[in-house]
Image: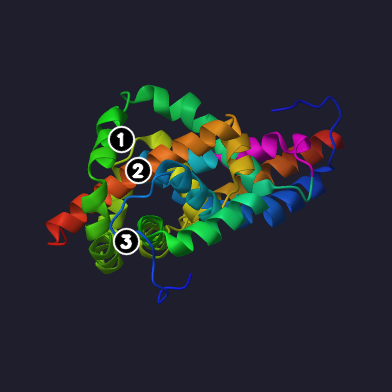
Amino acid sequence: MRKRTQPRYAPEEKVEIFESEFLPHIHSIYNFAYRITFDEDDAKDLVQETYLKSFRFIDSFEKGTNAKAWLFRILKNSFINEFRKKNKEPVKVDYQEVEAFYNTDEVNYIISANLQVEAIKEMIGDEVSIALNSLDVDFRTVIILCDIEGFTYEEMALILDVPIGTIRSRLHRARNLLRDMLKKYAGSMGYK
Amino acid sequence: MASTRKMKNVERPCPDHEKCVHIINLVMDGEANEEEEAFFFSHVRDCFHCAQFYKLEQSIRDAIKKKIEVLSAPAELIKELKKKVKDSFQESSKDAQ
């Protein structure tokens, strides 16, 4: 975060920016915080920390620019610095195993794809949530940012502080894993 | 996509599926350039394998957007944040005087 020696905004203007540009995103911020922590209290703490930091460093925010991406970036940094380190490392997924599955099951995939589409359409929210929640937090994050929040790759790269190429490859892996999870559910529903 | 149009190679896997997957995802994410979009529309229309992949991906994206509950921030959290900002504003106003 860029530090400025001179305040950019008067105190009244800071409050106005906070309320008109930052607060409208609080539901998205909370939803994201909950989806990466799975804990209401942690999500509340993370949102509070994010918003208090946003106010503290408001002079480094340019009024009228992308407040939502700016807030998500603060949240991501807070999550890494304060929350993630106190938890255990998440379980790593064997990507090679998943990729091998896709490479050897092409024909079956085509035959069953229509049934899987039907199965996914019939799934309830809980099943989709469970599949999303089962992903490693880095993969879950890019799916949420892209598919739920509608950020562009460029915005995601800025929020997560990684190159766009990393966003593309992370999304690709995340989508493969999510598809695998949903296929398992589809199988359990009798769509094989 | 012309769903009624007869597709070629119905049961033969796409020879370049990996490249197609990449482009299909770019198109669906709104990140494809003109060339990639042109490839998508010309290829997916005729390739059964890629068309199936496209439909499956679309159903997954729809499920994520429409079926996952979007949680709202608790009202007391918003109230508390507003109060803290207001307190901070009052402190900085005092300092300025």
Residue B88: percent from left, percent from top? 69, 40
Image quarter where the C terminus of chain A lies is bottom left
In primary-sequence order, the first of circles 2 and 1 is 1
- For mark 1, give the secondary structure: helix
Residue under label 2: A176
The residue positioned 32% from the left and 46% from the top of the image is A178
In the image, A137 versus B82, the foreground residue is: A137
In 3D space, how far apart are the residues under numbered discs 2 and 1 (Cα atoms)?
8 Å
Residues at discs 1 and 3 both on one chain: no
Q: Main secondary structure of the magenta part?
A: helix
Task: Confirm or deny contact between disc 2 and disc 3 (CB under 8 A).
Answer: no
Name the residue at the front extreme. B8
Examine the structure image and report whether residue B66 is included in the region drawn in magenta.
Answer: no
- For mark 2, give the secondary structure: helix
In the image, A187 versus B19, the foreground residue is: B19
Q: Which label lies toward us, 2 or 3? A: 3
Residue A99 — which label? 1
In 3D space, how far apart are the residues under numbered discs 1 and 3 (Cα atoms)?
23 Å
